[in-house]
C-alpha cells in the first residue's frame, strides 16, 4: 500500500488544538476518501471527493473538514480536536471503474489520540 | 437505513481447517457486497466481492455466499493459514451510491 501514504502515522494532541492529517497517492486515482475506525467498529466514512472540485460529506462529517489540494492530495482537518475524535483514520482512493469499490486502496492509517 | 453487522466478533479455528465468517445486512437496496481483510497495523485490503444478482462467488481459497432471502452474507476461507489471522469486514454499496458502508468486523485467529 505504498501507493497511498498518510502523514503523520501517529499523533498525540490536546483538546482544542487544530490538527491536519494528510494523504497522498501515486495511483492516479480521481476518487479519495477519509474514514474513521474506532475499536470494535468498522470504518465510517467522514468525507469523500470524486475529483478536485468535488467534496461530499460522509456519515460522520461533523467536527471535520477536508481539502482536495490536487488530484493526488486529500487532507483532513480537525478544527478543534476533542477526545471522542481519538481513533484510527484511513485514507483511501479508487478509480473511475464501474465497480469502484473493487479498486479502493487504503493507506496505512493515522492513529490519533486527543487528550 | 444503512446497516451492516456481524454475528460474531471473534472466531478461532485450527490451522488447516475451514472458517466461515458471517454478516447480516438490512438494506435490500444494496447491490454490491465486499469482504475486506485488515491485518494488524495495516489498512483494509479487498478480498472478494459479489453482486446482488449472484448467490456465490469463488476466489483463491475464499468463497462468498449471498442469501438475499435472509439478507445474509458469508465468507468461507478454506485450509486456513496463519496469515489468514486478521479482522474481516463485510461492506455494502447501496444501489446507485458510490460509497461503502462497513460492518463491525470479525477477528479471525488461526491456532497452530
Image (cartoon, coloured by chain):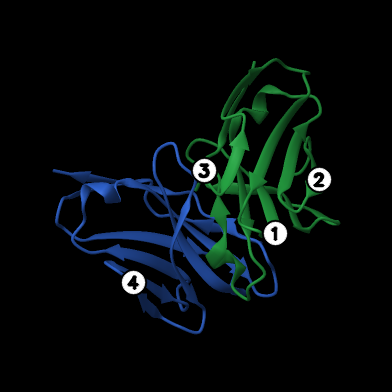
Chain colours: A green, B blue
Chain assignment, label 3: A
In this view, the mark in front (4 or 2): 2
As measured in the structure, the alpha-carbon distance from the residue carrying label 3 to the one carrying label 2 is: 30 Å
Q: Position of residue B2 (x, y in %)?
A: 63, 61
* Left or right of residue A94: residue A51: right
Residue A15 seen in render: yes
Chain assignment, label 2: A
As measured in the structure, the alpha-carbon distance from the residue carrying label 4 to the one carrying label 2 is: 38 Å
In this view, the mark in front (3 or 2): 2
Label 2 sits on residue: A69
First of labels 2, 1 by sequence position: 1
Label 1 sits on residue: A31
Q: Residue at x 69, y 54 (%)?
A: A32
Q: Residue at x 66, y 61 (%)?
A: B99
Asked if the residue under mark 2 is in contact with the one under mark 4, i.e. CB atoms within 8 Å, the reply is no
Label 3 sits on residue: A41
First of labels 3, 2 by sequence position: 3
First of labels 1, 3 by sequence position: 1
As measured in the structure, the alpha-carbon distance from the residue carrying label 3 to the one carrying label 4 is: 26 Å
For residue A61, what is the image quadrant? top right
Amino acid at each position: 500500500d505504498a501507493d497511498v501514504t498518510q502523514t503523520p502515522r501517529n499523533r498525540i494532541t490536546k483538546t482544542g488544538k487544530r490538527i491536519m492529517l494528510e494523504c497522498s497517492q501515486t495511483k492516479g486515482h480521481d476518487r479519495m476518501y477519509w474514514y474513521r475506525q474506532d475499536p470494535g467498529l468498522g470504518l465510517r466514512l467522514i468525507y469523500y471527493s470524486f475529483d478536485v472540485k468535488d467534496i461530499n460529506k460522509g456519515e460522520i462529517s461533523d467536527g471535520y473538514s477536508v481539502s482536495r489540494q490536487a488530484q493526488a492530495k486529500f487532507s483532513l482537518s480537525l478544527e478543534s480536536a476533542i477526545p471522542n475524535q481519538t481513533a484510527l483514520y484511513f485514507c483511501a482512493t479508487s478509480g473511475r471503474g464501474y465497480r469502484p469499490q473493487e479498486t479502493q486502496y487504503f493507506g496505512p492509517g493515522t492513529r490519533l489520540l486527543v487528550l | 437505513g444503512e446497516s451492516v453487522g456481524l454475528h460474531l466478533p471473534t472466531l478461532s479455528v485450527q490451522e488447516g481447517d475451514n472458517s466461515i465468517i458471517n454478516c447480516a445486512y438490512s438494506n435490500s437496496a444494496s447491490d454490491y457486497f465486499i469482504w475486506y481483510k485488515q491485518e494488524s497495523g495495516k489498512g483494509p485490503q479487498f478480498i472478494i466481492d459479489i453482486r446482488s444478482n449472484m448467490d456465490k462467488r469463488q476466489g483463491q481459497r475464499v468463497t462468498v455466499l449471498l442469501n438475499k432471502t435472509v439478507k445474509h452474507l458469508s465468507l468461507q476461507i478454506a485450509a486456513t493459514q496463519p496469515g489468514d489471522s486478521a479482522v474481516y469486514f463485510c461492506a455494502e454499496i447501496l444501489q446507485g451510491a458510490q460509497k461503502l458502508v462497513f460492518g463491525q468486523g470479525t477477528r479471525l485467529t488461526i491456532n497452530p
